[in-house]
Image (tube, helix red, strand yellow):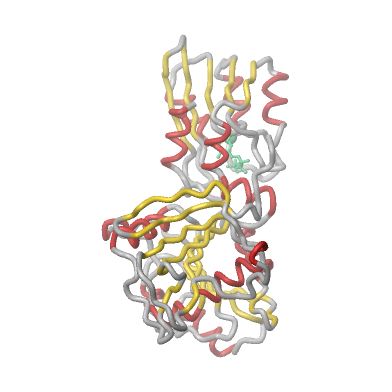
Amino acid sequence: MQQALKAAHLKRGLTSPNPWVGAVVVRDGQIVGEGATMPAGGEHAEAQALASAKSGDTLYVTLEPCTPFPGKRTRPCVEAITEAGINRVVIALLDSDPRVRGRGITLLREAGVQIEIGDGAAEAQTLLRPYLKHRETGSPYVIAKFAATLDGRIATAEGDSQWLTGEPARERAHRQRNWVDSVLVGSGTAIADDPSLTARPNGRTMARQPLRVILDGRGRLSPEARMFQEPGRTLIATSYEANSVWKARLATAGAQIVECEQSSRGLNLNQLLATLAQRGVLSVWAEGGGTVLGSLFDGDHVDEVWAFLAPSIIGGSGIAAVGGKGVTRATDALRLRESTVEMVGEDILVRGYTGAWSPQPQ
Ligand code: AOF
Ligand code: ZN
């Protein structure tokens, strides 16, 4: 199972909207085949593993094998497994997809296959959090990332923010773009920094790029923004009321326009996140600024936090990493669960889950 989990990890985020799954075939106690899910619409992990092994008796797989359902793009794995003569399947996790959940196990049992569930469940669940949330709730998994000083500021009162954290922290954050389905920023950040929002580990631009999502309710982003010259697609979330000439100009620059309801508190994020999920976006890496993160926290949309803290102080009226309404009582402050701390160069990385969503018990 550990080897199957490793194979799955290498495909993390690259198979959306499908889950990244790993599988290993064993014969007489020896590993004779291995596979992982191919990019969306492609072969599943079990099919790959079975094809790479001539025969086997046991299959280890990180997710419940799939069953037939309408609109399915690949051959159901339960068929491939029974046809290959496998008589024992060890499964880490039940599938959260309502079209499959539980049926994979039932069909295999009916075919006389011995089933064991739960080996590697905790690891598989952590690895698949974006997929599990997407299938359980119809909303993508949201990771809030910010780089702030010890006093929680992302910029001075004048808006100067370069460079609070060091190169190793920036590189570490950047690497996340290699596996997430989308990178989200507000129009303020997009205008101030004119970012490319691409995944380019070690300066190499990846073939697969996350979808850029810009929250721009008032229609402020220029069609000349740098991101429109970069590889990858850009989605502008704006209001129904925003200027239609501006919308047309951005569409000409290559942007997809998604219109959402807007109130005094900003764009309707429930609506936007549901739209992203329908388009197969499993994960959102939200990079700020403070207004966007504030709205995401206020709406209980954030599932995981990555806070890079520079050992420095801005003070004064420096801009807060998380704006929005916030809470009034200190006891209501959001406390991260299972939080971890590590040094990244000279900066401190604090990570944890918010508990806004937790995986279904198995
Ligand atoms: C598996 N192994 O490696 C993956 C599974 O449209 P399809 O045919 O690709 O089916 C998609 C569904 O199959 C997906 O929603 C999920 O339930 C399951 N994904 N299942 O047995 C795999 N990626
Ligand atoms: Zn399958």
Q: Which quarter of the figure is the C terminus placed in?
A: top right
Q: Nearer the viewer, residue 332 or 141?
A: 332
Picture quarter containing residue 172?
Answer: bottom left
Looking at the image, the residue that sits furthest to the top is 28
Ligand 1 quadrant in view: top right
Q: Nearer the viewer, residue 72 or 144?
A: 144
User: Residue 68 location in percent, x, y?
Assistant: 68, 35
Query: Which percent across, then down, holds residue 201?
Result: 31, 56
Q: Which residue is depicted at the point 60% across and 79% down? A: 238
Left or right of 23: which side holds 81?
right
| Residue sitting farthest toward the left | 203
Q: Relative to 317, is 93 above or below? A: above
- Residue at point 54%, 84% (across, down): 248
Picture residue at 73% right of the left edge, 19% below the top: 110
User: Quick check: 185 above or below 168?
Assistant: below
Closer to the camera in the image, 188 or 106: 188
224 w.r.t. 211: above or below: below
The residue sitting at the front extreme is: 330
Answer with the quarter of the image where residue 210 lies: bottom left
Q: Position of residue 271 (x, y in %)?
A: 68, 68
x%, y% of residue 8? 47, 37
Residue drawn 72% across the image and 42% down it: 98
Task: Give the mark count.
Answer: 0
